[in-house]
């Protein structure tokens, strides 16, 4: 009889050198989820440029987005493979709950830096479309200036000087019957975050094709569905205590840099329900069972089971 596949949000993935340390860290993460909700962490995705006709390579693009990951596995796969890499604590969800949460499946695309492929072309095109929309959005902001003329520039280079009113009317014509450029850009960047480029020449990296990952992406957060907000100062202190080196690291985003902790987002409720109210079970190592039960005591309907029972 085939095993049922469910979705798992697993932790802690990094930083613990002993079983006892991993258990302490896992319990700390579970407590923070129970208290504050699901954490969306900022990551920067590198999109390699295409190999051009003259043999040169186009400019790499960088997409920054906040997301949380879920992996669809059977319980056997979870115990045998997944936990060793992603952590031995897992919050389990029925697949229908992922849809309710607003998560979407990730596209794993194999590509190589030394040659073109359909996957490389697709990823480069999405990145270039993002840059195009960013450029149009910037020009739209400049067109609001009271100056009679505006200077079109690309990558800091002077291009041409045009009447501001002409630019404004041109942009209005281009976007007629479309959503605002800012909304189109946000959705395209969120979609790009669902692309996972994998080195086609790396056998170990290709194993990710088997993970069946889903992501909840901050760019697709719906205020009518999600109660989401940055962590409070107290919540930031908790996260820093869990993994200071990770959360205090300064990361380069689209146009600025910031400590990772300052760019996180907490999804506290989904359609009025706390995040853990959507979960089916919490699976933990045997040595952390009692502490895990205490950590989710505010969720009496949530089962806690030992992963290695």
Image: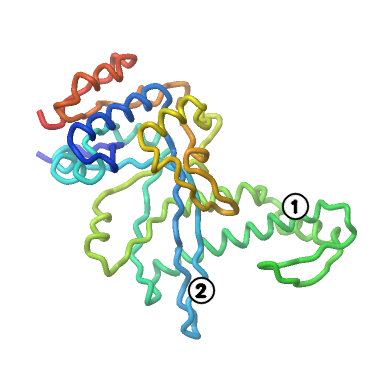
Secondary structure of the residue carrying numbered label 1? helix
Q: Residue at (20%, 41%) from the top-left corner? A: 83
- Vertical placement of residue 91 versus 123, above or below: above
Q: Position of residue 302 (x, y in %)?
A: 27, 20
- Outermost residue toward the bottom in this view: 54
- Residue linked to disc 1: 141
Q: Residue at (34%, 14%) from the top-left corner? A: 298
Q: Residue at (27%, 54%) from the top-left corner? A: 208
Q: Would you identify the image quadrant in which residue 45 lies? A: bottom left
- Vertical placement of residue 142 versus 4, above or below: below
- Taking 209 as reference, is 170 left or right? right
Q: Quadrant of the N terminus?
A: top left
- Outermost residue toward the right in this view: 148
Q: Would you identify the image quadrant in which residue 300 lies? A: top left
Q: Would you identify the image quadrant in which residue 133 lies? A: bottom right
Q: Position of residue 289 (x, y in %)?
A: 18, 23
**Pick the front one: 64 or 127:** 64
Q: Which mark is residue 58?
A: 2
Q: Position of residue 227 (x, y in %)?
A: 51, 27
- Vertical placement of residue 232 versus 212, above or below: above
């Amino acid at each position: 009889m085939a095993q049922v596949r469910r979705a798992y949000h697993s932790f802690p993935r990094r930083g613990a050198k002993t079983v006892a340390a991993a258990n302490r860290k896992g319990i700390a993460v579970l407590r923070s989820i129970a208290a504050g909700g699901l954490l969306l962490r900022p990551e920067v995705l590198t999109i390699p440029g295409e190999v051009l006709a003259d043999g040169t390579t186009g400019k790499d693009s960088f997409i920054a987005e906040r997301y949380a990951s879920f992996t669809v596995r059977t319980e056997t796969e979870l115990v045998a493979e997944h936990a060793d890499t992603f952590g031995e604590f897992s919050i389990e969800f029925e697949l229908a709950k992922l849809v309710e949460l607003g998560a979407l499946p990730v596209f794993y695309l194999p590509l190589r830096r030394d040659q073109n492929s359909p996957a490389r072309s697709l990823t480069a095109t999405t990145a270039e479309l993002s840059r195009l929309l960013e450029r149009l959005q910037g020009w739209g902001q400049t067109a609001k200036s009271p100056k009679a003329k505006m200077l079109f520039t690309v990558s800091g280079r002077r291009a041409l000087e045009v009447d501001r009113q002409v630019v404004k009317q041109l942009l209005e014509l281009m976007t007629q019957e479309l959503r605002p450029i800012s909304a189109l850009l946000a959705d395209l960047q969120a979609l790009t975050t669902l692309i996972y480029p994998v080195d086609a020449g790396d056998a170990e990296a290709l194993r990710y094709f088997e993970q069946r990952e889903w992501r909840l992406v901050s760019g697709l957060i719906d205020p009518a569905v999600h109660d989401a907000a940055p962590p409070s100062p107290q919540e930031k202190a908790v996260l820093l205590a869990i993994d200071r080196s990770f959360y205090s690291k300064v990361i380069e985003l689209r146009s600025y840099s910031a400590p990772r902790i300052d760019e996180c987002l907490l999804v506290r409720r989904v359609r009025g329900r706390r995040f853990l109210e959507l979960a089916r079970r919490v699976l933990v190592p045997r040595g952390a069972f009692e502490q895990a039960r205490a950590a989710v005591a505010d969720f009496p309907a949530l089962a806690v089971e030992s992963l290695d029972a």
